[in-house]
Image (cartoon, grey):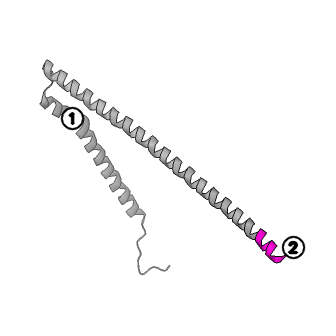
Amino acid sequence: MDFSHVLGWVLLTVLAVGSGVIGGAMLHYWRQRKQLADSTNYLLDRLKVAESDINRLQEETFLLREYLNRRGLLDEDDLALLRKELIELPRQLEAERAELLKGALKKDEEERLVKNIPDTLH
């Protein structure tokens, strides 16, 4: 076998392996891209379902308010008082608890710190 003949086979082998690697990389890229597109479509579908649920809840709330208004059972002052009692006060209490807990943690941390006194030997 002559040197150019061996060089031709080596070159052919390198090209074949390179083509295989490039083809495999492209196949992997397209699969990853398809998976990403499928995941995105799934998330968008779930978002549409959540949006329709929210719209339905808003419609039902509107229907209930309108029904109670027509019956004369709903008063805006009562709604404001109920909102304060059920939503605003629990939020305020939770914020106060979080602030007290944060303050207690800072105080506890300050008590654990050892102050550096220059007269002491280390």
What residue appears at the point 35 percent right and 51 percent down from the top-left corner?
101
**Residue 81 percent location from the top left of the image:** 17, 33
> Which of the 4 quarters of the picture holds residue 87?
top left
Q: In this view, does 4 lie to the left or right of 96?
A: right
Q: Which residue lies furthest to the top in this view?
A: 71
Quadrant where the image shows the N terminus: bottom right
What residue appears at the point 60 percent right and 53 percent down from the top-left corner?
27
Q: Mark 1 points at which residue?
A: 83
Q: What is the tally of numbered marks visible in this picture? A: 2
Which label number is shown at residue 1? 2
Residues 81 and 65: in front is: 65
Tell me, yes or no, whether the highlighted magenta stretch contains residue 12. no
Front: mark 2 or 1 = 2
Mark 2: amino acid: Met
Residues shaded magenta: 1-9
Would you call the spot at circle 1 few (<14 residues within 10 Å), some (14-19), or many (20 or more)? few
> Which of the 4 quarters of the picture holds residue 63?
top left
What residue appears at the point 71 percent right and 63 percent down from the top-left corner?
17
